[in-house]
Amino acid sequence: MQSSAQQVYFLSNGTAITAETLGLSLLAQFPDCQFQTRTIPFIDTLEKAHKVSNEINRGSGNGNNQMPIVICTMGDADLMQIISQSRALMIDPFGEILPRLEKVLSAQHHEPGQSHRTVNPSVYDSRIDAIDYAMVHDDGGKTQNYNEADIILIGVSRSGKTPSCLYLALQFGIKAANYPITEEDMEFEQLPKPIRAFKPQLYGLTTDLNRLVKIRQERRPNSRYSSSKQCRYELKAVEEMYQRHNIRYINTSEMSVEEISARIIRDNGLHRIELP
Amino acid sequence: MQSSAQQVYFLSNGTAITAETLGLSLLAQFPDCQFQTRTIPFIDTLEKAHKVSNEINRGSGNGNNQMPIVICTMGDADLMQIISQSRALMIDPFGEILPRLEKVLSAQHHEPGQSHRTVNPSVYDSRIDAIDYAMVHDDGGKTQNYNEADIILIGVSRSGKTPSCLYLALQFGIKAANYPITEEDMEFEQLPKPIRAFKPQLYGLTTDLNRLVKIRQERRPNSRYSSSKQCRYELKAVEEMYQRHNIRYINTSEMSVEEISARIIRDNGLHRIELP
Protein backbone atom coordinates (compact mmCIF):
# COMPACT_ATOMS: atom_id res chain seq x y z
CA MET A 1 0.00 0.00 0.00
CA GLN A 2 3.04 2.20 0.26
CA SER A 3 3.50 4.73 -2.44
CA SER A 4 6.37 7.13 -2.74
CA ALA A 5 5.04 8.96 -5.80
CA GLN A 6 3.09 12.13 -5.14
CA GLN A 7 -0.46 11.89 -6.51
CA VAL A 8 -1.43 14.80 -8.77
CA TYR A 9 -4.80 15.42 -10.43
CA PHE A 10 -5.45 17.64 -13.44
CA LEU A 11 -9.16 18.44 -13.51
CA SER A 12 -11.55 20.47 -15.64
CA ASN A 13 -15.09 20.69 -16.92
CA GLY A 14 -13.53 20.94 -20.40
CA THR A 15 -10.70 19.02 -22.04
CA ALA A 16 -8.33 19.63 -19.08
CA ILE A 17 -5.59 20.52 -21.53
CA THR A 18 -4.93 23.82 -19.76
CA ALA A 19 -4.78 22.19 -16.30
CA GLU A 20 -2.48 19.50 -17.62
CA THR A 21 -0.17 21.82 -19.57
CA LEU A 22 0.22 24.19 -16.63
CA GLY A 23 0.48 21.29 -14.18
CA LEU A 24 3.19 19.43 -16.06
CA SER A 25 5.21 22.64 -16.38
CA LEU A 26 4.95 23.20 -12.64
CA LEU A 27 5.92 19.62 -11.81
CA ALA A 28 8.90 19.85 -14.17
CA GLN A 29 10.35 22.37 -11.70
CA PHE A 30 10.78 19.50 -9.23
CA PRO A 31 13.00 17.09 -11.15
CA ASP A 32 13.85 15.06 -8.04
CA CYS A 33 10.27 14.24 -7.09
CA GLN A 34 8.22 11.31 -8.34
CA PHE A 35 4.69 12.04 -9.49
CA GLN A 36 1.75 9.93 -10.40
CA THR A 37 -0.59 12.08 -12.45
CA ARG A 38 -4.18 11.59 -13.47
CA THR A 39 -6.11 13.80 -15.88
CA ILE A 40 -9.89 13.87 -15.56
CA PRO A 41 -11.63 16.01 -18.20
CA PHE A 42 -15.32 16.84 -18.71
CA ILE A 43 -16.32 17.06 -15.04
CA ASP A 44 -19.44 18.92 -16.10
CA THR A 45 -22.15 17.87 -13.65
CA LEU A 46 -22.49 18.13 -9.88
CA GLU A 47 -22.63 14.36 -9.71
CA LYS A 48 -19.36 13.92 -11.56
CA ALA A 49 -17.71 16.57 -9.38
CA HIS A 50 -18.78 14.75 -6.20
CA LYS A 51 -17.51 11.48 -7.58
CA VAL A 52 -14.08 12.96 -8.37
CA SER A 53 -13.92 14.67 -4.99
CA ASN A 54 -14.66 11.35 -3.28
CA GLU A 55 -11.93 9.69 -5.28
CA ILE A 56 -9.42 12.34 -4.22
CA ASN A 57 -10.43 11.91 -0.58
CA ARG A 58 -10.09 8.15 -0.75
CA GLY A 59 -6.58 8.58 -2.14
CA SER A 60 -5.57 11.04 0.55
CA GLY A 61 -6.94 8.84 3.31
CA ASN A 62 -5.43 5.67 1.96
CA GLY A 63 -2.62 5.22 4.50
CA ASN A 64 -0.84 7.72 2.35
CA ASN A 65 0.37 10.66 4.36
CA GLN A 66 1.18 12.72 1.30
CA MET A 67 -1.44 15.30 0.51
CA PRO A 68 -2.59 14.96 -3.11
CA ILE A 69 -2.14 17.97 -5.37
CA VAL A 70 -5.10 19.11 -7.47
CA ILE A 71 -4.73 21.53 -10.36
CA CYS A 72 -8.19 22.43 -11.51
CA THR A 73 -9.33 24.85 -14.21
CA MET A 74 -13.10 25.05 -13.90
CA GLY A 75 -15.29 27.40 -15.90
CA ASP A 76 -18.05 26.88 -13.35
CA ALA A 77 -18.12 28.13 -9.77
CA ASP A 78 -20.54 25.49 -8.43
CA LEU A 79 -18.40 22.65 -9.72
CA MET A 80 -15.24 24.31 -8.42
CA GLN A 81 -16.88 24.67 -5.04
CA ILE A 82 -17.36 20.90 -4.79
CA ILE A 83 -13.86 20.04 -5.98
CA SER A 84 -12.27 22.59 -3.67
CA GLN A 85 -13.68 20.85 -0.60
CA SER A 86 -11.53 17.79 -1.30
CA ARG A 87 -8.63 16.99 1.03
CA ALA A 88 -5.82 18.18 -1.21
CA LEU A 89 -3.53 21.05 -1.99
CA MET A 90 -5.94 22.89 -4.26
CA ILE A 91 -4.55 24.97 -7.09
CA ASP A 92 -7.26 26.95 -8.84
CA PRO A 93 -5.57 29.22 -11.41
CA PHE A 94 -8.85 30.59 -12.75
CA GLY A 95 -10.09 31.50 -9.28
CA GLU A 96 -6.83 33.22 -8.50
CA ILE A 97 -6.30 35.06 -11.76
CA LEU A 98 -9.75 35.92 -13.17
CA PRO A 99 -10.64 38.55 -10.55
CA ARG A 100 -7.46 40.44 -11.44
CA LEU A 101 -8.25 40.31 -15.14
CA GLU A 102 -11.81 41.48 -14.49
CA LYS A 103 -10.49 44.63 -12.91
CA VAL A 104 -8.32 45.53 -15.88
CA LEU A 105 -10.93 44.54 -18.42
CA SER A 106 -13.78 46.23 -16.53
CA ALA A 107 -15.81 43.22 -17.58
CA GLN A 108 -17.40 40.37 -15.83
CA HIS A 109 -16.39 37.01 -17.06
CA HIS A 110 -19.23 34.88 -18.32
CA GLU A 111 -21.90 33.43 -16.10
CA PRO A 112 -20.83 30.40 -14.14
CA GLY A 113 -22.19 27.23 -15.65
CA GLN A 114 -21.90 28.53 -19.16
CA SER A 115 -19.32 26.72 -21.19
CA HIS A 116 -16.55 28.95 -22.46
CA ARG A 117 -15.74 26.67 -25.35
CA THR A 118 -16.51 28.10 -28.74
CA VAL A 119 -15.10 26.65 -31.92
CA ASN A 120 -14.24 29.41 -34.33
CA PRO A 121 -15.05 27.93 -37.76
CA SER A 122 -12.44 29.96 -39.62
CA VAL A 123 -9.72 28.88 -37.19
CA TYR A 124 -10.90 25.30 -37.53
CA ASP A 125 -10.79 25.51 -41.32
CA SER A 126 -7.29 27.00 -41.29
CA ARG A 127 -6.07 24.11 -39.19
CA ILE A 128 -7.71 21.53 -41.42
CA ASP A 129 -6.27 23.18 -44.53
CA ALA A 130 -2.84 23.18 -42.95
CA ILE A 131 -3.14 19.52 -41.95
CA ASP A 132 -4.27 18.54 -45.45
CA TYR A 133 -1.32 20.47 -46.82
CA ALA A 134 1.17 18.81 -44.48
CA MET A 135 -0.15 15.34 -45.28
CA VAL A 136 0.06 15.81 -49.05
CA HIS A 137 3.45 17.52 -48.90
CA ASP A 138 5.08 15.16 -46.43
CA ASP A 139 8.41 13.56 -47.25
CA GLY A 140 8.63 15.12 -50.72
CA GLY A 141 5.40 13.30 -51.61
CA LYS A 142 4.17 16.13 -53.74
CA THR A 143 6.48 18.95 -54.72
CA GLN A 144 3.97 21.11 -56.56
CA ASN A 145 2.36 23.98 -54.67
CA TYR A 146 5.50 24.76 -52.68
CA ASN A 147 4.64 28.38 -53.43
CA GLU A 148 1.77 27.97 -50.94
CA ALA A 149 4.07 26.74 -48.17
CA ASP A 150 4.70 28.96 -45.18
CA ILE A 151 7.80 26.87 -44.53
CA ILE A 152 9.59 23.92 -46.16
CA LEU A 153 11.63 21.81 -43.77
CA ILE A 154 14.58 19.95 -45.23
CA GLY A 155 16.94 17.39 -43.74
CA VAL A 156 18.15 13.82 -43.87
CA SER A 157 15.79 10.93 -43.15
CA ARG A 158 14.76 10.84 -39.45
CA SER A 159 15.86 14.31 -38.48
CA GLY A 160 12.40 15.31 -37.23
CA LYS A 161 10.76 16.83 -40.30
CA THR A 162 7.40 15.05 -40.25
CA PRO A 163 6.50 15.54 -36.57
CA SER A 164 7.49 19.19 -36.80
CA CYS A 165 5.36 19.80 -39.89
CA LEU A 166 2.36 18.09 -38.32
CA TYR A 167 2.73 20.02 -35.08
CA LEU A 168 3.05 23.33 -36.95
CA ALA A 169 -0.14 22.50 -38.87
CA LEU A 170 -2.20 21.20 -35.96
CA GLN A 171 -1.14 23.66 -33.32
CA PHE A 172 -0.62 26.80 -35.35
CA GLY A 173 -2.39 26.35 -38.70
CA ILE A 174 0.93 26.82 -40.50
CA LYS A 175 1.33 25.24 -43.95
CA ALA A 176 4.51 23.24 -43.66
CA ALA A 177 5.95 20.96 -46.35
CA ASN A 178 8.99 18.78 -45.94
CA TYR A 179 11.53 17.51 -48.41
CA PRO A 180 14.04 14.79 -47.58
CA ILE A 181 17.63 15.40 -48.66
CA THR A 182 18.80 12.12 -50.15
CA GLU A 183 22.27 10.86 -50.84
CA GLU A 184 21.80 11.68 -54.48
CA ASP A 185 20.98 15.30 -53.66
CA MET A 186 24.21 15.56 -51.71
CA GLU A 187 26.41 14.95 -54.71
CA PHE A 188 25.55 18.23 -56.37
CA GLU A 189 26.57 21.78 -55.63
CA GLN A 190 23.09 23.10 -56.33
CA LEU A 191 20.04 22.66 -54.19
CA PRO A 192 17.74 19.81 -55.26
CA LYS A 193 15.58 20.95 -58.15
CA PRO A 194 12.12 20.79 -56.48
CA ILE A 195 13.16 23.18 -53.70
CA ARG A 196 15.59 25.38 -55.61
CA ALA A 197 13.14 28.18 -56.34
CA PHE A 198 11.88 28.34 -52.75
CA LYS A 199 14.97 29.34 -50.82
CA PRO A 200 13.21 31.90 -48.60
CA GLN A 201 10.91 29.19 -47.27
CA LEU A 202 13.62 26.59 -46.64
CA TYR A 203 14.63 25.72 -43.11
CA GLY A 204 17.09 22.95 -42.30
CA LEU A 205 17.02 20.36 -39.56
CA THR A 206 20.03 18.43 -38.38
CA THR A 207 20.76 16.17 -35.46
CA ASP A 208 23.59 14.55 -33.53
CA LEU A 209 25.30 11.50 -34.97
CA ASN A 210 24.50 9.19 -32.03
CA ARG A 211 20.88 10.18 -31.97
CA LEU A 212 20.47 9.63 -35.71
CA VAL A 213 22.17 6.23 -35.59
CA LYS A 214 19.94 5.17 -32.71
CA ILE A 215 16.70 6.24 -34.41
CA ARG A 216 17.70 4.67 -37.71
CA GLN A 217 18.79 1.44 -35.97
CA GLU A 218 15.28 1.07 -34.60
CA ARG A 219 13.90 1.27 -38.11
CA ARG A 220 16.46 -0.80 -40.03
CA PRO A 221 18.92 -2.47 -37.67
CA ASN A 222 22.39 -3.31 -38.98
CA SER A 223 21.79 -1.69 -42.34
CA ARG A 224 23.93 0.68 -44.35
CA TYR A 225 21.15 3.26 -43.72
CA SER A 226 21.69 3.09 -39.97
CA SER A 227 25.47 2.73 -39.92
CA SER A 228 27.60 5.34 -38.19
CA LYS A 229 29.56 5.86 -41.36
CA GLN A 230 26.52 6.60 -43.49
CA CYS A 231 24.87 8.82 -40.87
CA ARG A 232 28.08 10.79 -40.40
CA TYR A 233 28.43 11.30 -44.14
CA GLU A 234 24.85 12.48 -44.56
CA LEU A 235 24.91 14.88 -41.61
CA LYS A 236 28.17 16.44 -42.78
CA ALA A 237 26.92 16.78 -46.34
CA VAL A 238 23.60 18.30 -45.36
CA GLU A 239 25.14 20.80 -42.96
CA GLU A 240 27.58 21.86 -45.67
CA MET A 241 24.61 22.29 -47.99
CA TYR A 242 22.86 24.56 -45.47
CA GLN A 243 25.98 26.65 -45.04
CA ARG A 244 26.78 26.88 -48.75
CA HIS A 245 23.30 28.18 -49.55
CA ASN A 246 22.84 30.27 -46.39
CA ILE A 247 19.92 28.21 -45.18
CA ARG A 248 19.06 28.59 -41.52
CA TYR A 249 19.07 25.36 -39.57
CA ILE A 250 18.84 23.90 -36.10
CA ASN A 251 20.05 20.79 -34.36
CA THR A 252 16.98 19.01 -33.04
CA SER A 253 18.73 16.35 -30.91
CA GLU A 254 17.84 17.72 -27.52
CA MET A 255 14.54 19.27 -28.47
CA SER A 256 10.92 18.29 -28.09
CA VAL A 257 8.62 18.67 -31.09
CA GLU A 258 7.12 21.69 -29.31
CA GLU A 259 10.49 23.36 -29.02
CA ILE A 260 11.52 22.68 -32.61
CA SER A 261 8.22 24.16 -33.80
CA ALA A 262 8.43 27.22 -31.56
CA ARG A 263 11.95 27.93 -32.82
CA ILE A 264 10.92 27.54 -36.45
CA ILE A 265 8.11 30.05 -35.91
CA ARG A 266 10.40 32.52 -34.21
CA ASP A 267 13.32 32.18 -36.64
CA ASN A 268 11.08 32.64 -39.65
CA GLY A 269 8.65 35.20 -38.25
CA LEU A 270 5.76 32.93 -39.18
CA HIS A 271 2.20 34.02 -38.64
CA ARG A 272 0.19 31.55 -36.60
CA ILE A 273 -3.49 31.27 -35.93
CA GLU A 274 -4.73 31.42 -32.40
CA LEU A 275 -6.29 28.33 -31.03
CA PRO A 276 -9.29 28.04 -28.74
CA MET B 1 -3.36 55.40 -32.97
CA GLN B 2 -6.56 54.35 -31.29
CA SER B 3 -6.84 50.71 -30.40
CA SER B 4 -9.79 49.07 -28.76
CA ALA B 5 -8.23 45.63 -28.51
CA GLN B 6 -6.56 44.81 -25.22
CA GLN B 7 -2.88 43.96 -25.70
CA VAL B 8 -1.84 40.64 -24.12
CA TYR B 9 1.66 39.11 -24.00
CA PHE B 10 2.48 35.44 -23.42
CA LEU B 11 6.12 35.25 -22.36
CA SER B 12 8.59 32.56 -21.35
CA ASN B 13 12.23 31.56 -21.38
CA GLY B 14 11.03 28.30 -23.00
CA THR B 15 8.52 27.62 -25.76
CA ALA B 16 5.83 29.75 -24.06
CA ILE B 17 3.31 27.01 -24.73
CA THR B 18 2.26 26.93 -21.08
CA ALA B 19 1.84 30.70 -20.88
CA GLU B 20 -0.12 30.71 -24.11
CA THR B 21 -2.36 27.76 -23.24
CA LEU B 22 -3.22 29.15 -19.83
CA GLY B 23 -3.56 32.66 -21.22
CA LEU B 24 -5.92 31.74 -24.04
CA SER B 25 -8.11 29.79 -21.59
CA LEU B 26 -8.29 32.81 -19.31
CA LEU B 27 -9.11 35.19 -22.16
CA ALA B 28 -11.84 32.82 -23.39
CA GLN B 29 -13.69 33.66 -20.17
CA PHE B 30 -14.21 37.17 -21.56
CA PRO B 31 -16.05 36.53 -24.82
CA ASP B 32 -17.10 40.18 -25.24
CA CYS B 33 -13.59 41.62 -25.09
CA GLN B 34 -11.24 42.09 -28.02
CA PHE B 35 -7.67 40.96 -27.54
CA GLN B 36 -4.50 41.36 -29.49
CA THR B 37 -2.11 38.68 -28.34
CA ARG B 38 1.59 38.25 -28.84
CA THR B 39 3.63 35.20 -27.86
CA ILE B 40 7.35 35.71 -27.25
CA PRO B 41 9.22 32.48 -26.46
CA PHE B 42 12.90 31.87 -25.58
CA ILE B 43 13.48 35.03 -23.52
CA ASP B 44 16.56 33.41 -22.06
CA THR B 45 19.05 36.23 -21.52
CA LEU B 46 18.96 39.42 -19.47
CA GLU B 47 19.33 41.39 -22.67
CA LYS B 48 16.29 39.78 -24.28
CA ALA B 49 14.27 40.31 -21.11
CA HIS B 50 15.11 44.02 -21.08
CA LYS B 51 14.19 44.31 -24.74
CA VAL B 52 10.79 42.69 -24.19
CA SER B 53 10.14 44.81 -21.12
CA ASN B 54 10.90 47.95 -23.12
CA GLU B 55 8.52 46.83 -25.82
CA ILE B 56 5.74 46.31 -23.27
CA ASN B 57 6.38 49.76 -21.82
CA ARG B 58 6.31 51.40 -25.23
CA GLY B 59 2.93 49.76 -25.87
CA SER B 60 1.50 50.86 -22.57
CA GLY B 61 2.71 54.42 -23.03
CA ASN B 62 1.54 54.68 -26.61
CA GLY B 63 -1.51 56.92 -26.10
CA ASN B 64 -3.18 53.72 -25.12
CA ASN B 65 -4.76 53.97 -21.72
CA GLN B 66 -5.37 50.27 -21.46
CA MET B 67 -2.86 48.50 -19.30
CA PRO B 68 -1.31 45.57 -21.18
CA ILE B 69 -1.70 42.13 -19.66
CA VAL B 70 1.38 39.94 -19.34
CA ILE B 71 1.18 36.22 -18.63
CA CYS B 72 4.68 35.00 -18.02
CA THR B 73 5.96 31.54 -17.07
CA MET B 74 9.63 31.98 -16.34
CA GLY B 75 11.88 29.24 -15.04
CA ASP B 76 14.37 31.89 -13.97
CA ALA B 77 13.97 34.40 -11.16
CA ASP B 78 16.39 37.01 -12.56
CA LEU B 79 14.61 37.11 -15.90
CA MET B 80 11.21 37.26 -14.17
CA GLN B 81 12.45 40.14 -12.08
CA ILE B 82 13.15 42.19 -15.20
CA ILE B 83 9.85 41.35 -16.89
CA SER B 84 7.87 42.04 -13.73
CA GLN B 85 9.05 45.65 -13.66
CA SER B 86 7.19 46.38 -16.89
CA ARG B 87 4.10 48.61 -16.79
CA ALA B 88 1.48 45.89 -17.12
CA LEU B 89 -0.89 43.69 -15.21
CA MET B 90 1.62 40.97 -14.42
CA ILE B 91 0.42 37.41 -14.09
CA ASP B 92 3.18 35.08 -12.91
CA PRO B 93 1.63 31.65 -12.33
CA PHE B 94 4.94 30.02 -11.40
CA GLY B 95 5.75 32.67 -8.83
CA GLU B 96 2.32 32.33 -7.30
CA ILE B 97 2.03 28.56 -7.29
CA LEU B 98 5.54 27.15 -6.84
CA PRO B 99 5.97 28.24 -3.20
CA ARG B 100 2.78 26.35 -2.32
CA LEU B 101 3.98 23.23 -4.10
CA GLU B 102 7.36 23.46 -2.39
CA LYS B 103 5.67 23.24 0.98
CA VAL B 104 3.79 20.08 0.11
CA LEU B 105 6.72 18.49 -1.66
CA SER B 106 9.22 19.53 1.00
CA ALA B 107 11.52 20.16 -1.90
CA GLN B 108 13.11 23.17 -3.38
CA HIS B 109 12.47 23.66 -7.02
CA HIS B 110 15.56 23.77 -9.14
CA GLU B 111 18.07 26.57 -9.07
CA PRO B 112 17.00 29.68 -10.92
CA GLY B 113 18.73 29.97 -14.25
CA GLN B 114 18.71 26.27 -14.85
CA SER B 115 16.48 25.20 -17.66
CA HIS B 116 13.74 22.82 -16.64
CA ARG B 117 13.37 21.37 -20.09
CA THR B 118 14.44 17.78 -20.39
CA VAL B 119 13.50 15.63 -23.31
CA ASN B 120 12.71 12.15 -22.13
CA PRO B 121 13.98 9.92 -24.96
CA SER B 122 11.45 7.15 -24.34
CA VAL B 123 8.56 9.62 -24.43
CA TYR B 124 10.00 11.11 -27.59
CA ASP B 125 10.30 7.69 -29.21
CA SER B 126 6.71 6.78 -28.28
CA ARG B 127 5.47 9.92 -29.94
CA ILE B 128 7.49 9.33 -33.06
CA ASP B 129 6.28 5.72 -33.26
CA ALA B 130 2.71 6.88 -32.87
CA ILE B 131 3.14 9.54 -35.57
CA ASP B 132 4.69 7.03 -37.96
CA TYR B 133 1.79 4.71 -37.25
CA ALA B 134 -0.83 7.40 -37.85
CA MET B 135 0.79 8.47 -41.12
CA VAL B 136 0.95 4.94 -42.51
CA HIS B 137 -2.54 4.02 -41.32
CA ASP B 138 -4.27 7.22 -42.37
CA ASP B 139 -7.39 7.06 -44.52
CA GLY B 140 -7.35 3.28 -44.81
CA GLY B 141 -3.92 3.58 -46.49
CA LYS B 142 -2.65 0.43 -44.88
CA THR B 143 -5.02 -1.95 -43.13
CA GLN B 144 -2.47 -4.43 -41.86
CA ASN B 145 -1.25 -4.05 -38.28
CA TYR B 146 -4.63 -2.89 -37.00
CA ASN B 147 -3.93 -5.23 -34.09
CA GLU B 148 -1.30 -2.69 -32.97
CA ALA B 149 -3.80 0.18 -32.99
CA ASP B 150 -4.90 1.68 -29.67
CA ILE B 151 -7.90 3.06 -31.53
CA ILE B 152 -9.31 2.95 -35.07
CA LEU B 153 -11.46 5.93 -36.01
CA ILE B 154 -14.11 5.37 -38.64
CA GLY B 155 -16.47 7.75 -40.40
CA VAL B 156 -17.42 9.30 -43.72
CA SER B 157 -14.99 11.45 -45.66
CA ARG B 158 -14.34 14.80 -43.87
CA SER B 159 -15.75 13.92 -40.50
CA GLY B 160 -12.51 14.74 -38.66
CA LYS B 161 -10.65 11.42 -38.62
CA THR B 162 -7.21 12.53 -39.79
CA PRO B 163 -6.74 15.57 -37.52
CA SER B 164 -7.93 13.54 -34.54
CA CYS B 165 -5.52 10.69 -35.25
CA LEU B 166 -2.60 13.06 -35.67
CA TYR B 167 -3.44 14.94 -32.50
CA LEU B 168 -3.76 11.69 -30.52
CA ALA B 169 -0.35 10.62 -31.81
CA LEU B 170 1.47 13.91 -31.35
CA GLN B 171 -0.02 14.96 -28.06
CA PHE B 172 -0.53 11.64 -26.32
CA GLY B 173 1.61 9.04 -28.13
CA ILE B 174 -1.51 7.04 -28.94
CA LYS B 175 -1.43 4.78 -31.99
CA ALA B 176 -4.51 5.79 -33.95
CA ALA B 177 -5.51 4.46 -37.35
CA ASN B 178 -8.43 5.67 -39.39
CA TYR B 179 -10.60 3.96 -41.95
CA PRO B 180 -13.03 5.84 -44.20
CA ILE B 181 -16.51 4.38 -44.55
CA THR B 182 -17.30 4.58 -48.26
CA GLU B 183 -20.60 4.36 -50.05
CA GLU B 184 -19.80 0.81 -51.01
CA ASP B 185 -19.29 -0.16 -47.36
CA MET B 186 -22.72 1.21 -46.55
CA GLU B 187 -24.55 -1.24 -48.75
CA PHE B 188 -23.72 -4.22 -46.57
CA GLU B 189 -25.04 -5.33 -43.22
CA GLN B 190 -21.62 -6.37 -42.04
CA LEU B 191 -18.77 -4.11 -41.08
CA PRO B 192 -16.19 -3.52 -43.82
CA LYS B 193 -13.82 -6.44 -43.98
CA PRO B 194 -10.55 -4.72 -42.97
CA ILE B 195 -12.03 -3.51 -39.68
CA ARG B 196 -14.39 -6.40 -38.90
CA ALA B 197 -12.05 -8.22 -36.54
CA PHE B 198 -11.19 -5.08 -34.57
CA LYS B 199 -14.53 -4.06 -33.12
CA PRO B 200 -13.18 -3.25 -29.63
CA GLN B 201 -10.86 -0.66 -31.13
CA LEU B 202 -13.45 0.99 -33.39
CA TYR B 203 -14.77 4.44 -32.59
CA GLY B 204 -17.12 6.32 -34.89
CA LEU B 205 -17.17 9.99 -35.84
CA THR B 206 -20.16 11.74 -37.30
CA THR B 207 -21.05 15.36 -37.96
CA ASP B 208 -23.99 17.64 -38.77
CA LEU B 209 -25.32 17.74 -42.30
CA ASN B 210 -24.70 21.46 -42.85
CA ARG B 211 -21.18 21.26 -41.55
CA LEU B 212 -20.33 18.29 -43.78
CA VAL B 213 -21.82 19.93 -46.87
CA LYS B 214 -19.85 23.10 -46.19
CA ILE B 215 -16.53 21.30 -45.72
CA ARG B 216 -17.06 19.12 -48.78
CA GLN B 217 -18.15 22.12 -50.88
CA GLU B 218 -14.78 23.73 -50.19
CA ARG B 219 -13.06 20.64 -51.53
CA ARG B 220 -15.25 19.80 -54.52
CA PRO B 221 -17.84 22.52 -55.13
CA ASN B 222 -21.11 21.55 -56.83
CA SER B 223 -20.25 17.88 -56.95
CA ARG B 224 -22.30 14.84 -56.05
CA TYR B 225 -19.78 14.31 -53.21
CA SER B 226 -20.69 17.64 -51.63
CA SER B 227 -24.43 17.61 -52.34
CA SER B 228 -26.89 17.74 -49.46
CA LYS B 229 -28.54 14.59 -50.70
CA GLN B 230 -25.33 12.57 -50.74
CA CYS B 231 -24.10 13.90 -47.40
CA ARG B 232 -27.47 13.17 -45.78
CA TYR B 233 -27.44 9.64 -47.15
CA GLU B 234 -23.91 8.92 -45.93
CA LEU B 235 -24.44 10.33 -42.45
CA LYS B 236 -27.65 8.36 -41.99
CA ALA B 237 -26.05 5.15 -43.24
CA VAL B 238 -22.96 5.50 -41.09
CA GLU B 239 -24.92 6.29 -37.92
CA GLU B 240 -27.10 3.27 -38.53
CA MET B 241 -23.94 1.20 -38.94
CA TYR B 242 -22.61 2.44 -35.59
CA GLN B 243 -25.89 1.60 -33.88
CA ARG B 244 -26.30 -1.79 -35.53
CA HIS B 245 -22.85 -2.89 -34.40
CA ASN B 246 -22.85 -1.12 -31.04
CA ILE B 247 -19.95 1.09 -31.95
CA ARG B 248 -19.52 4.16 -29.79
CA TYR B 249 -19.53 7.43 -31.70
CA ILE B 250 -19.57 11.19 -31.30
CA ASN B 251 -20.77 14.12 -33.33
CA THR B 252 -17.73 16.33 -33.94
CA SER B 253 -19.52 19.35 -35.44
CA GLU B 254 -19.10 21.72 -32.53
CA MET B 255 -15.82 20.35 -31.28
CA SER B 256 -12.21 21.37 -31.57
CA VAL B 257 -9.63 18.71 -32.41
CA GLU B 258 -8.52 18.90 -28.77
CA GLU B 259 -12.00 18.14 -27.52
CA ILE B 260 -12.60 15.27 -29.93
CA SER B 261 -9.30 13.72 -28.85
CA ALA B 262 -9.92 14.19 -25.14
CA ARG B 263 -13.34 12.53 -25.49
CA ILE B 264 -11.91 9.60 -27.44
CA ILE B 265 -9.33 9.04 -24.70
CA ARG B 266 -11.95 9.19 -21.97
CA ASP B 267 -14.56 7.05 -23.72
CA ASN B 268 -12.04 4.34 -24.53
CA GLY B 269 -9.95 4.50 -21.37
CA LEU B 270 -6.82 4.95 -23.48
CA HIS B 271 -3.43 5.10 -21.90
CA ARG B 272 -1.52 8.22 -22.86
CA ILE B 273 2.09 9.16 -22.40
CA GLU B 274 2.95 12.25 -20.47
CA LEU B 275 4.55 15.02 -22.36
CA PRO B 276 7.30 17.32 -21.19
Image (tube, coloured by chain):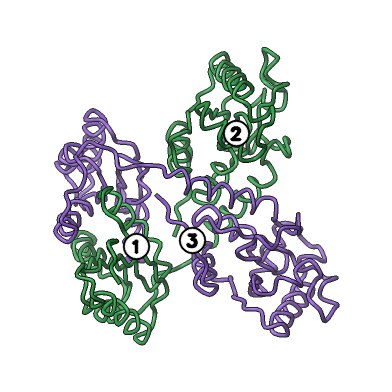
Chain colours: A green, B purple
Q: Which residue is mark 1?
A: A36
Q: Quadrant of the C terminus of chain A?
A: bottom left
The answer to whether dots 3 and 1 both sit on one chain is no
Which of B22/B215 is in front?
A: B22
Point out the tag, 2 or 1, that comes first from the N-terminus.
1
Hey, what amino acid is under mark 1?
A: Gln
Hey, what amino acid is under mark 3?
A: Arg
For residue A275, above or below residue B246:
above
Q: Which residue is mark 2?
A: A152
Q: CA distance from mark 3 to mark 1?
A: 13 Å
Q: Which residue is mark 3?
A: B272
Query: Would residue A112 appear left or right of A123 to someone viewing this image?
Result: left
Residue A103 in the image, given as x and y percentages of width and height: 18, 63
Query: Would residue A182 appear left or right of A211 to someone viewing this image?
Result: right
Mark 3 or 1, closer to the camera? 1
The answer to whether dots 2 and 1 both sit on one chain is yes
Q: Residue at x 76, y 55 (%)?
A: B142
Hey, what amino acid is under mark 2?
A: Ile
Residue B119 in the image, given as x and y percentages of width and height: 41, 42
